[in-house]
Amino acid sequence: MNTYASSSDPSFTSTKQVPARQSHATHQSNGPVEYGFTDKVAELFCAHGSPENQEAATPGRVVRLDRNRVLVASAEGLLHLPYPKHGLVPATGDWVWLGHNNAGEPAVVEVLPRYSALSRKRAFEASSEEQILGSNIDIVAVVVPVDRPLTHNRLERTLVAAWDSGATPLVVITKADLAHLADDVVGEVILQAAGVDVVTTSAEQGDGLDELMQRIPEGATLVLLGPSGAGKSTLINALAGRELQQTGEVRAGDGKGKHTTTSRELVPLAGGSVLMDTPGVRGFGLFDADEGMDEMFGDLEELFSRCRFTDCVHQAEPGCAVQEALAEETLDPRRWASYLKLQRELAALARKHDAAARRAYQREWHQRVMSADRGQRAAERYKHDQAEERTGKGGKRRKR
């Protein structure tokens, strides 16, 4: 479960003083408006106050992460700055305080708490670490192209992460002009993504773009999430009204495209809204997504409550509502299998976390024991040396 600061939390909207900090009302109108700086964000800055010894600090937002630098938007324009040495590691979309380092050079001096974050498990198999794809997002748009078969499990997995991020999920169907079966795909998506709005678009024809823009409030941040070749770059160019992203061709054999977008970056849109482009994501490992699972599979949670036994594992127990629904074909076996697979994945990740925590504890305990043991041995050697220094072998006083 992910927990973030919220505009409904009194500590988020208050202007309380923070020890050793100052809150400046002048900062509320001194942020990068075209990158989503709104009254809500100004309240976030006001609630936390400027960092110590940074009375002239101003708000900024991370636009892109480069190898050695952070591209940050301020009221004055874009700045390439070094990574901060302390605090949170910045992510695209983070709100930051901009000030000066000890050498008097412009610097990111603090990353503010995130009110939403889209994350996944890091891509390599052995990892149990979280990767933040983007922060302070208002809408997560899951891009589904109609020119390839719909991958149900992938859609469910991505929607779980979208729900869990703290943002509002949205499904955007692309390339509707390229397939005769667009209506069938739309129907499948609406059925599978129950409770999530679905917008059908054709960036080439300009269809559905107005409807999509109506779903993005002024100052809100939208992230597009989907596989390579899904038409995200074409959609971004259409929404921005200019050529911002390079587009690539999709292979006819498997429908996969090249990663024409290589980094996550914020793109200002008309009306003060912001779009976050992301590279095509081949895999999306869930990370601590209990809330997202509850939202995506709420119908299953309702079935669980109807089982005869509270500890039912939904296999062969009498009175199992899940097995009854499967037998009556009111529950899709594929959906149930997808739920079980995601739960196994989350359980495995939790075990990795627990194992990592146990190893860290054991290392720390071993170091303490070894340190104590070394200290004990040192004390004994000291006593022994002192005794020998006072008396030599045979009880004689040792010469100095």
Image: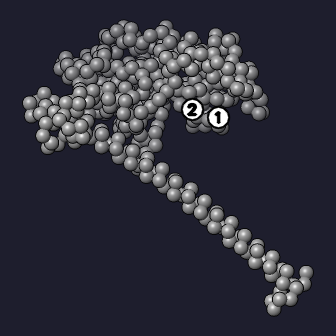
> Residue 188 lies in what quarter of the image?
top left
User: 253 or 79: which is nearer to us?
Assistant: 79
Under circle 2, the secondary element is: loop
Look at the picture and state if 104 lies above or below 380.
above
> What crowding class fits label 1: few (fewer than 14 Cα within 10 Å), some (14-19), or many (20 or more)?
some
- Image quadrant in which the N terminus is located: top left
How far apart are the alpha carbons under marks 1 and 2?
A: 8 Å
Quick one: SS at disc 1?
A: loop
Q: Residue at x 8, y 30 (%)?
A: 328
Q: Measured from the top left, where is residue 260 in percent x and y?
A: 42, 30
- Please say whether residue 58 is visible from this viewpoint: no
Depth order, front residue of 107/163: 163
User: Dot 2, crowdedness within 10 Å: few (<14), some or many (≥20)?
Assistant: many
Residue with the mark numbered 1? 84
Q: Amino acid at mark 1?
A: Pro
Residue 175: percent from left, percent from top: 29, 20
Q: Is residue 270 left or right of residue 391?
A: left
Q: Which is more N-terminal, label 2 or label 1?
A: 1
Does residue 318 appear left or right of residue 170 in this picture? left
Rendered position, 189 above or below 228: above
Q: Which residue is mark 2?
A: 90
Q: Are marks 1 and 2 in contact (CB under 8 Å)?
A: yes
Q: Which residue type carries mark 2?
A: Pro
Residue at the image point whose x is 81% and y is 76% from the top? 386
Q: Is residue 97 visible?
A: yes
Q: Which quadrant of the rendered structure holds the C terminus?
A: bottom right
- Within the image, what quadrant is residue 13 found in? top right
Looking at the image, residue 99 lies above or below residue 274:
below
